[in-house]
Amino acid sequence: MRGPDVIRFARDAASGNPLRTALSLLAMAIGVAAVVVLTALGDGARRYVVAQFSTLGSNLVIVLPGRSATGGFSPANAVTRTPRDLTIDDAAALLRSPHVARVAPLTAGSSEINVGGKLREVIVAGTTASYLQVRNFHMAQGSFLPEGEWTRSTPVAVIGGSVYRELFGSGTAVGEYVRLGGRRVRVIGVLAATGTGMGMNTDELVLVPVALAQQMFDSNTLFRVLVQAQSRNAIESAKRHAAETIKARHGGEEDVTVITQDAVLATFDRLLGALTAGVAGIAAISLAVAGILVMNVMLVAVAQRTGEIGLLKALGARAATIRQAFLVEAALLSLAGAALGYLLGQTGAWLIRALYPAFPAYAPAWAVIAALATSLGTGLLFGWMPAQRAAAMDPVQALMKH
Amino acid sequence: MPLIELSAIERTFLLGDSTVHALARIDLSIAQGEYVAILGPSGSGKSTMLNLLGLLDRPNAGVYRLEGRDVTTLSPDEQAQVRSQRIGFVFQSFHLVPRLTAAENIALPMMLAGIPAAERARRVGKALREFGLENRSDHRPDQLSGGQRQRVAIARATVMQPALLLADEPTGNLDRSTGDDVIALLETLNANGVTLIVVTHDVTVGARAHRQLRMEDGRLIGDERRDRADHRRVTSADLRK
């Protein structure tokens, strides 16, 4: 039997029983669609987190007060108390490393902002001019904090996009005076919208010189020091240098944690990658179930077409020809179901992206290929037994079943 | 050389713990071009005989030579090859594939044999004309009358130009006049050189054959020839060899 004839014969045989064929197609389609949609969700979560971390800026090394026991990234880092404060001078000392391009100290607290009777709660972040480049921010209006003023508490502020809209509507903000935690400060700039980054919505921020923030919150300590390395390759050296410098300044005690953005990213990447693989594995179970259904359908087909099998044998079909015809039928069912499921799954992922534009729900190529290959594989695997049964039939017995 | 030569053929079935002799020591010789009817009550072994002649079944003992070649020792695939090229079957219940059209049913043996589509179409077209089925080529079996179905089945059985045509109760599902037409068609094919073996319990159908084999309890109990010179291409001398 020629190749195209085998395929046409199998296709006609499958379409000869539309309901049964449609049901097994549906089962296979659901399996493949489940893999596509679930891995799109898992990988979307991974991409989302990675993108969030990327908004922090590039080549970042972050110095946190407090010693983390594991050296990794954990929420405990944020609450551990340190015997020695991380100070502005510590941050300034980090600038002396040849691997470091910029250093931005960061201190934070919440306060009230008040202009023309409008009052709202804001997060006030104290930092320096280099924060703009370190975080990769852009200005919508005016200018950022003045250069070189680490210890001067100039009463100026840069406000985030939402703060600007809520307090000034669409009017002029630059040059206006606002009351911030009881102090009169002049607005010198408005940040361009960036969205959220690491849980801190920068559109809701008010940025002031670090010395001013420390006065407002009556504290000498820093919340973070953000260090931008000269290049990607310099990240590790910058990290080591930062740790050594602070240790030397703190009387030989390692009381800070230095993490790199890459390490955090890699951890999340691994974590969510594993999650995606796990979810894909669960979805693959439905593929196996679909494979068993294909076997069931093919067994019924063999039983129903026993007379036909006898006839084919009488007409001179070899066992291999009959096996081939039934295997191709199973493969066609699986392939068509997989193709349908692929379309369903991609439509589902597209729907998710349409509903949640921030969430990049794209199924990874490996998952799609694995799902299609698995569906074809299970179809052939589970199609083998029925096909073998058909091929091994005794022609006399088979002909009597007509 | 006879077309078919059976010597000491035995076919037994186990029914529970008793052995049934469906065929018991059959010796038979059928020449090329003969028209043979196998007659007998049900259970006499005539269907087993036909299955055996058609290589659908194997004897437990004995030798079956088809065109001088011992076919009992062939592998199943080799037997399939012989069925494909040398043997055509006509069944009582037609055995047409319901989802295929008349033309596709006729083409089925050629498709299985791997004959190219163009050649198949040519031969199917010829068969449809010869069997008066031109207007029915796109009809499925359920859109055809009983007589048309059997004609499609006969066209399918002969499209590979076999040497041997085996018909199992070919008129069993047809009314008398349609049955007569079908028999006449088979006789025309025989007149053109195909060896025709008809299994039937219908005595009037059997009486038309040139040679009647009577079977009972798995044994051949009668072998009569009815000489009709006008129909005979093969001489009696050939048969005695």
Image (tube, coloured by chain):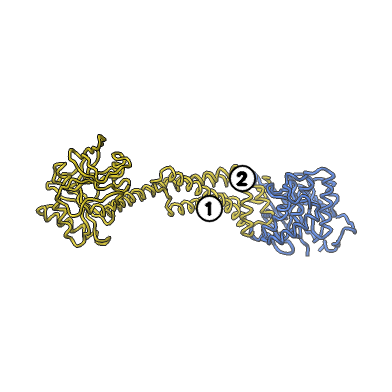
Chain colours: A yellow, B blue
**Is any atom of residue A128 visible in this view?**
yes
- Please, what secondary structure does the residue beneath circle 1 have? helix
Q: Amino acid at mark 1?
A: Leu
Give the chain letter at badge 2: A
Left/right of residue B227 with respect to residue B148 in the rendered view? right
Q: Quadrant of the N terminus of chain A?
A: bottom right
Left/right of residue B4 with respect to residue A367 in the rendered view? right
Residue closest to the eye, A218 or A177:
A177
Q: Amino acid at mark 2?
A: Ala
**To which quarter of the image does residue A322 belong?**
bottom right
| Residue A231 percent across, percent down from the top left | 26, 61
Residue at mark 2 shares a chain with residue at mark 1:
yes
| Residue B187 percent across, percent down from the top left | 83, 54
Residue closest to the eye, A261 or A382:
A261
Q: Quadrant of the C terminus of chain A?
A: top right
Left/right of residue B220 with respect to residue A402 in the rendered view? right
Residue at point 65%, 56% (across, down): A317
Residue at point 58%, 54% (across, down): A328
Sequence order check, earlier mark of 2 and 1? 2
Contact check, label 2 and label 1, Cβ < 8 Å: no
| Residue A246 percent across, percent down from the top left | 14, 54
Give the chain letter at badge 1: A
| Residue A271 percent across, percent down from the top left | 32, 49
- Please, what secondary structure does the residue beneath circle 2 have? helix
User: Residue lying farthest top?
Assistant: A117
Q: Which residue in the structure is indicated by mark 1? A: A380
**To which quarter of the image does residue B165 belong?**
bottom right
Q: How far apart in space, not on screen, are marks 2 and 1 (Cα)?
A: 18 Å
What numbered label is drawn on residue A17? none
Q: Which residue in the structure is indicated by mark 2? A: A303
